[in-house]
Image (cartoon, rainbow, N blue to C red):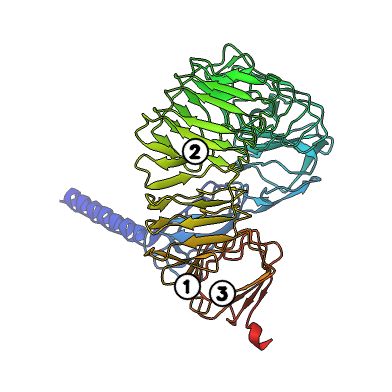
Amino acid sequence: MKRTILLFSVAILCLLFCLGLVSCEDKYVTIKFNTMGGNTIESIQVEKGGKIPKPSDPEKLGYSFDKWCYEGVEWVFVGYVATEDMTLEAKWTPIEYTIEYVCEGTHSNKTSYTVENGFELSDAIREKHIFLGWYEDKEYTKPIAKIEKGTMGSLTIYGKTQKSPLVLVRDGDEYTVSCWDKNITSVEIPSKHNGRPVTTIDIYGFEGCTRLESITIPNSVTKIGGLAFKDCTSLESITIHSSITKISGNVFKNCANLERIEVDEENKNYSSIDGNLYSKDEKTLIQYAPGKKETSFTVPNSVTIIDNRAFESCARIKFITIPSSVTAIGEGAFFYCESLISVGIENGVKTIGNRAFYYCTNLKIITIPSSVTAIEGNLIHDCARLERIEVDEENKNYSSIDGNLYSKDKKTLIQYASGKKETSFIVPNCVTTIENSAFDFCLSLTSVTIPSSVTKIAEEVFEDCIYVERIEVDKENKNYSSIDGNLYSKDQKTLIRYAEGKKETSFTIPSGVTKIGDCAFVGCALVSITIPNSVKSIGYEAFSHCANLTIYCEAESQPSGWNSYWNDSNCPVVWDYKNK
């Protein structure tokens, strides 16, 4: 019996002890501190419902401590109490460090950074100098190319420059080269700069280097920009090495002494025949060396395309033969071939580009073979001696009348031969359309008569017709009219073209006119013009190249209907002139 009582008493005591332990555990909660990469802060226990004592601020390299948060919300130690086990997380703010740059030049680099945002340093720019890099020390022995992520502390970085005739501009991981020193006589382009390859000769890169006699282009260069060697008049030869993949248009413009353009045989895009530049397959004549001394040239039979501006500024060449293999003559192909007298175009050519014979001032005749299907834009410009444009009778798209160019059905006047000596011209009655620039640079004409059949006159028809004093229109014409030799719409509300060759120095727009057309007064010799309030619209470049003109307007200010380029020559304008 005693043993039973003893066991029962022990059991009761154990139960009470266990209940006491549970009660004790319910009284406390555990608080953990996650420093998010900072130094360790040990967990603590606090009474349930009690306040959590604020620990010492943690530390973390590159950061300043901001606050403690619980489940994303800032924990305020003064007012909040703990009701359960919790983990408080530290929030940090990256320290912003400053960077001082010591360099004789300008740059766009950041002047501060944090441990989280490293960045690559961009080059400094200094006039007439090249940039040699950034350094950690002023002795320039420890180069630095970027601020690495994780870097800490304020920095002083030193930039090194060196005087050079070249300009090297970084584009990503490559450099583009050009030259500021127009008196340079020879140059060697580096293959690398600041550890990165020099890959591109910039557009206009060596323009105007008139004394440049030799240039060494490294194998790193893959692209040569347009007009890169424009006006390099002392350059006699140049070699295109195997790595060059792109040569943009008109690279050697006005290189008057360039006799040879040589191409490395390993080049996969270009080739050379007798010092002229061709595509690799020799089907495109890209550039005839403008300094060649020969006066005649026959395009090789392998060629199918004469590229844009291929013969530009070839001042010595007089006679060119284009074989039947050629199907296309590019835009401005014979631009400024001032000695060119004759071009023999064999049957085979299908297209002739815009202004293919621009400023061929000695060219007397152009013959269009039967194969030509498209003449793009203005065939000629300032061809002062061109007396005839002949068209093969078998051609299905074009025809000629008295040496002028027409559509096959003769309803469209495309081009008047600008070198003709006649002073007046009557447009044939079969014509319904006069194309843009049809009378371009017709320096002998003083008058043009437009018949009743014409229903459309394109813009700039009379561009640079500096001696045309009268543009007459048949009274029966239903679309156009003439007042004092100037061209108007039939209702005379639109002034289309003022006759550029008039000798008068002043002109008053008729009061019924409401619109002045595009290029209406281009090149006129007027000293003054008066524009009435009735004019609500003025077109693009209406007064372009009017060097001595003053414009008097009744309007108090520019009406909204006037094109923003109506006065692109910035002629003086007197607004509200009647009240001045």
Please give the label number shown on residue 403.
2
Tag 3: amino acid = Ile
Q: Position of residue 62 (x, y in %)?
A: 63, 48
Mark 3 closeness class: few <14, some 14–19, many ≥20 residues within 10 Å:
some
Mark linked to residue 509: 3
Q: Which residue is mark 1?
A: 79
Kindly indicate whether the residue at mark 2 contacts the one at mark 3 (C-beta within 8 angstroms): no
Label 2 neighbourhood size at 10 Å, few (<14), some (14-19), many (20+)? many
- Mark pair 3, 2: CA separation: 37 Å
Is 530 situated above or below 272? below
- Earlier sequence position, callout 3 versus callout 2: 2
271 versus 419 height, above or below: above
Amino acid type of the residue tagged 2 in the rendering: Gly
Instruction: Note whether 501 is above or below 338 in the view shown.
Output: below
Foreground residue, 526 or 367? 367
Q: Nearer the viewer, residue 574 or 9?
A: 574
Question: SS for tag 1?
Answer: loop
Q: Earlier in the sequence, mark 2 or mark 1?
A: 1
Badge nearest the viewer, 1 or 3: 3
What residue occupies the far bottom of the structure in this picture?
Answer: 579
Disc 1 + disc 3, Cβ < 8 Å: no
The quarter of the picture where residue 261 lies is top right
**Residue 507's x, y, as percent?**
62, 72
Q: Position of residue 484 (x, y in %)?
A: 55, 69
